[in-house]
Image (cartoon, rainbow, N blue to C red):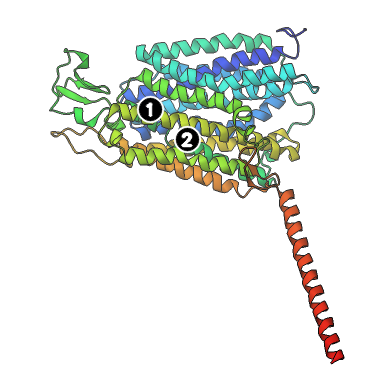
Amino acid sequence: KGWGFRDPRLRPFVIISIAYLLFTVTDGAIRMIVLLHAYHKSFSALQVALMFTLYELAGVFTNLAAGLMGAKWGIRFTLIVGLCLQLLSYGLLFGWQDGWSDETAIAYVTVAQMFGGIAKDLTKLGGKTVTKLVTPEGKDTRLFRLVSLLTGWKNSLKGVGYFLGSALLEVSYELALGFMMGLIVLALPFAIWGLDAELGTAKKKNSSFKEIFVWDNFNLNVLSLARLFLFASRDFWFEVPLPFFLRSPNCDVLGPDFPCTPDQDPTACDDGSTCDPSLSFCANINTGGGCGGPGVGRTVVGAFLGGYIILYGQIQSWTPQLVTGPLGQTPPNKMTEVFWGMINCLPTMIAAIAVYVSPAFTEHRLGGMTAWLIVIIVTFAVIFAINSSIHSYLVVKYAAADKVAVSVGLYYMSNALGRLMGTLGSGFLYTYAGGEVNAIGGYDPGHDATLGLAACFVAGTVSSLLAAVITIWIRDEESGLKCGPCLTLVAPKEVVEVEEGKEEMEEEDIRKRDLAERTVENIEVGEAKRLE
């Protein structure tokens, strides 16, 4: 009773959620639109990775500045600026011309993407902050459940954006851009006329940039470094190499041995290849993307990546109820994260081995290749979501002592740095680690995409391992580590101290008993000698 859209506690959350959810769809879509359009224009994986450089780098600095801007001018201001910058980013992408040189196109798209990166973090500020602003101080569990439920779906809508962007691009590049701009325009009125300008502003003196970097919080700083490598472990293979590999065609169906004419049946060439009118045989759409993959269409690529994001978002929101709670790992500590961080190494390690040696990849068996990729994506999404959820809890736990919300700026900045490192590293590895494929009748189909993807999986595994090892340095092991109600992997510190105390008492009792026995023996020996 009394809960509705007009309720002052709930209205800001509903309005910002609508704007943020619509924006999230466009944020997921812009990556797929740029990446797949660039692939069709024959840009290499490294060149595409460079296009995302300023998008990720913008996140490093915007994460630091957004909190200060929101505290000074309010969430309404940052939300409106974020939505407008996203419109600008999409509008600039309309100007991408086919006749430009590679260097000009890369520079132009990189700048356009930069505005999208700034927009993402400015808009995210409202979506992340309003949940705290509308949650009452009392025990109003109904509101808390509603906030938790809607927040959990935000990540999943980014996956919807991945799929929509890819599917619309299959129809038209301009249609994909225009549709996403329409969603942003739809969100703007909610932000402009539905929110109080004072919402989220600081009630006292605002923090400074100097206060954001809290170097004396050892646990938070170590967790930030671990977070960098955790997110790099995903982006070393997911954001650029995976879609490039999915689009790349079978190397064995390219070249002069597969003649064609442009006016014949389009299916004359295998998936991922095209009938080149200047060559009159089936050729790779993008030699810079390599060959050796399944050659699926853009919509299928979007479904693969979008499915991962949706699954990741749902698992992340339900981790306490489905995973850490039943295992007795709630609330989690540093040992919980080390445990799951080590498990996070397994999917990419197995994937690297499978891509190197499995006949599904070495002999290009499409069914086996697809099955392997689905298992890898699903398994990694589940485990990575658990790790991310544990990290989200630990940052709040470790930052609590500072009593300053912006003290976690360094932590959130590490997200963007990890994505930047993974994206650039993946572009380089995928492009150059595979080596060249033997020319087919004088035709060069590109590098070996299979070996390039395997190298990216290896890099992801190393990055996961580093994240887990770094987490060991955190000083937080008092509560131990359980793995279910019956199995304790590491006893809580208090229990260990009690057990050690018991052992010391037992050793002392043994020493006293031995001393008493020796004393009795000495007395008996002395008495015997006296009697003699």
- Categorize mark 2 by other alpha carbons within 10 Å: few (<14), some (14-19), many (20+): many
Quadrant where the N terminus is found in the figure: top right
Q: Is residue 324 left or right of residue 265?
A: right
Q: Is residue 58 left or right of residue 506?
A: left
Please tell me which residue lies in front, 366 or 77. 366
Percent position of residue 344, x then y? 50, 39
Q: Which residue is mark 2?
A: 234
Hey, which residue is sitting farthest front in the picture? 532
Please tell me which residue lies in front, 134 or 66. 134
Please tell me which residue lies in front, 481 or 442. 481
* Identity of the residue drawn at 86% across and 90% down: 531
Kindly identify the amino acid type of the residue bearing the numbered disc 2: Arg
Which image quadrant for residue 357? top left
Please tell me which residue lies in front, 131 or 393. 393
Percent position of residue 104, x then y? 37, 28
Q: Which residue is mark 1?
A: 243
Hey, which residue is sitting farthest bottom in the picture? 532
Which image quadrant for residue 42? top left
Quote the CA–CA distance across marks 1 and 2.
Answer: 13 Å
* Identity of the residue drawn at 51% across and 24% down: 311
Q: Is residue 409 left or right of residue 115?
A: right
| Badge 2 element | helix
